[in-house]
Image: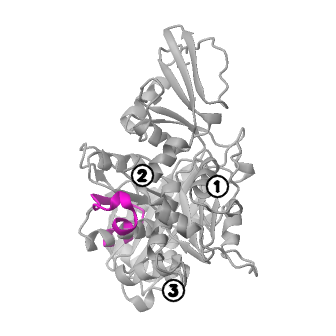
């Protein structure tokens, strides 16, 4: 198709495997055998959804900056799909994409080249330019430190052995499910406590208590390797805390940021933990709608260095996509920095220690997300319309809230989140329904549509606690009153028929 439509050359990752972050890195940094650069890329992906012949499959286009195409482009592409009458295809022999090298053809529009390149090399070199691999290697090869990485049979497996084992010296036995499979081994490659069952059990967070001592650090990736989950021994790090902790420690622990951060950003549903760090460190801060393209605009304008979203996406301005392996290397860098004097003896600073110290300094944002998956789309829309209608009278809202939980703070503000992009001036409306409480607590409701069946209602619940003596509670216990308010205020069961969420994060 490319040849028939006049493209001069196509680059393909070896075996057709490239992670989404690696695609972004390749667009931005790779120079072809003939000195060429990429103007964009097509990514064939199921993202973090189940994949295979009978499951999800998507085509994503990334622009010349390495980031996802903005809505102005994707809308035009969609309009074209409604009028297309024919497509062109050239009769060319197959190229063996298992073998690196350049194949030249005489296409209908002139010379046409297909270059198959090593999928990992460009990305690995980029990671080595960002992090101190020698200091991470000392950590991973220390007999006092143990590590586990689960690729959930996604594309991250193509990078895990190269980076963690060959470059950083981890044991190959520390890699779980690192053989990429087209159907992800029948699993759901979403790195959370529900779907990454094997890793969760190995890290001591499963329902059964094993006698085997869990590793010090664990992490998981999604199908296209742009999402990540970070775990300590018997300890879960929320994505909202993760990006805040990376930002708070980046200048000291990660060479790429040694000259300082330009700014930080988070998606609106993500907890305000990053806001507190930004204020403390006097950094520019941005709250954007969900969607990595909003971060990309800020990065292209030099306004943002580190960003993240609660849906297990974390990244920086090294590329224009979220980057799961980058996040793991960032955490390993922080652990290596905190333990540089401890690897020979003394108590190791653990993941839990780092998080608890962060809470003591900045306060804790108790946070949870309830996902109601495959809800009838019309019922989901009715629920959202009900929540918007309620916002017209805060007095009525507060009466309802007090009737549900008398000790919950008052609602001070309620709206539908709207964002005006400081770079291009565009406005994004209807980005989520917010109820903001006087004590800093928040309830956020969003409809999500990346799956292929029904609608997903996402409910985000957050409560800020500054008192260091109260930051050690179980999050579900601490948030129980707000959860009850959210479920009853939204009439979740009445509209959806669901008495419980599909996934709690």
Q: Residues within 10 Å of mark 3 (few under 14, many from 20)?
A: few
Residue 39, image x and y in percent? 41, 29
Q: Residues within 10 Å of mark 1 (few under 14, many from 20)?
A: many
* C-alpha span from label 3 to label 2: 39 Å
Q: Determine the secondary structure under disc 3.
A: loop
- Say above or below: 110 vs 362: above
Residue 195, image x and y in percent? 66, 61
On residue 129, which mark appears?
2
First reached walking from the N terminus: tag 2 or tag 1: 2
* C-alpha span from label 2 to label 1: 23 Å
* Residue depicted at 60% across the width and 74% down the height: 145
- Say above or below: 228 vs 147: above
Evaluate whether residue 134 shows in this view: yes
Relative placement, left or right, of 400 versus 222 is left
Q: Colour mode?
A: one colour
Residue extending farthest front? 344
On residue 473, which mark appears?
3
Front of the two marks 3 and 2: 2
Q: Determine the secondary structure under disc 1.
A: loop
Asked if labels 3 and 1 touch by Cβ distance under 8 angstroms, the answer is no
Residue 285's image quarter?
Answer: bottom left
* Residue depicted at 36% across the width and 82% down the height: 361
On residue 151, which mark appears?
1
For the record, the magenta segment spans 250-276
Asked if residue 260 is among those painted magenta in the image, a careful observer would answer: yes
* Residue depicted at 23% across the width and 44% down the height: 425
- Say above or below: 146 vs 8: below
* C-alpha span from label 1 to label 3: 31 Å
**Relative depth, front residue between 304 and 249:** 249
First reached walking from the N terminus: tag 3 or tag 2: 2
Relative placement, left or right, of 464 versus 422 is right
């Amino acid at each position: 198709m490319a040849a028939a439509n006049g493209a001069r050359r196509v680059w393909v990752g070896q075996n057709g495997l490239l992670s989404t972050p690696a695609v972004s890195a390749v667009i931005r940094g790779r120079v072809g055998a003939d000195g060429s650069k990429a103007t964009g890329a097509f990514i064939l992906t199921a993202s973090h959804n189940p994949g295979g012949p009978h499951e999800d499959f998507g085509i994503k286009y990334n622009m010349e900056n390495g980031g996802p195409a903005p809505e102005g482009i994707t809308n035009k592409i969609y309009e074209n799909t409604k009028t297309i009458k024919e497509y062109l295809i050239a009769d060319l022999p197959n190229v063996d994409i298992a073998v690196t090298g350049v194949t030249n053809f005489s296409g209908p529009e002139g010379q046409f080249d297909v270059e198959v390149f090593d999928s990992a090399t460009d990305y690995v070199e980029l990671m080595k330019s960002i992090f101190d691999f020698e200091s991470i290697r000392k950590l991973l090869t220390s007999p006092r430190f143990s590590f586990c990485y689960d690729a959930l049979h996604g594309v991250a497996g193509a990078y895990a052995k190269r980076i963690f084992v060959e470059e950083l010296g981890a044991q190959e036995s520390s890699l779980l499910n690192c053989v990429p499979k087209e159907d992800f081994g029948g699993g759901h490659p979403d790195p959370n406590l529900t779907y990454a069952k094997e890793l969760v059990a190995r890290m001591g967070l499963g329902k059964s208590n094993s006698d085997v001592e869990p590793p010090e650090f664990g992490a998981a990736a999604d199908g296209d390797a742009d999402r990540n989950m970070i775990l300590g021994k018997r300890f879960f790090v929320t994505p909202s805390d993760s990006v805040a902790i990376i930002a708070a420690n980046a200048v000291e622990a990660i060479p790429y940021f040694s000259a300082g951060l330009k700014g930080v950003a988070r998606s609106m549903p993500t907890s305000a933990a990053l806001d507190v760090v930004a204020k403390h460190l006097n950094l520019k801060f941005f709250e954007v709608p969900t969607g990595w393209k909003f971060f990309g605009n800020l990065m292209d304008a030099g306004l943002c260095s580190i960003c993240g979203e609660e849906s297990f996406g974390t990244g920086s301005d090294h590329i224009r996509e979220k980057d799961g392996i980058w996040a793991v290397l960032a955490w390993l860098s922080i652990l290596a920095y905190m333990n540089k004097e401890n690897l020979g003896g003394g108590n190791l600073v653990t993941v839990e220690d780092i998080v608890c110290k962060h809470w003591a300094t900045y306060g804790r944002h108790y946070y949870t997300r309830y996902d109601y998956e495959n809800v009838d789309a019309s019922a989901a829309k009715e629920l959202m319309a009900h929540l918007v209608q309620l916002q017209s009278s805060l007095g009525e809202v507060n009466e309802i809230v007090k009737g549900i939980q008398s000790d919950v703070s008052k609602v001070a503000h309620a709206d539908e989140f709207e964002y005006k992009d400081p770079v291009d001036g565009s406005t994004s409306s209807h980005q989520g329904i917010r109820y903001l409480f006087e004590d800093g607590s928040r309830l956020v409701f969003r409809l999500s549509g990346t799956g292929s069946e029904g609608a997903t209602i996402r409910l985000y619940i957050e409560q800020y606690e500054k008192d260091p003596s109260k930051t050690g509670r179980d999050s579900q216990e601490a948030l129980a009153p707000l959860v009850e308010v959210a479920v009853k205020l939204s009439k979740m069961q009445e509209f959806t028929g669901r008495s419980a969420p599909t996934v709690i994060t």
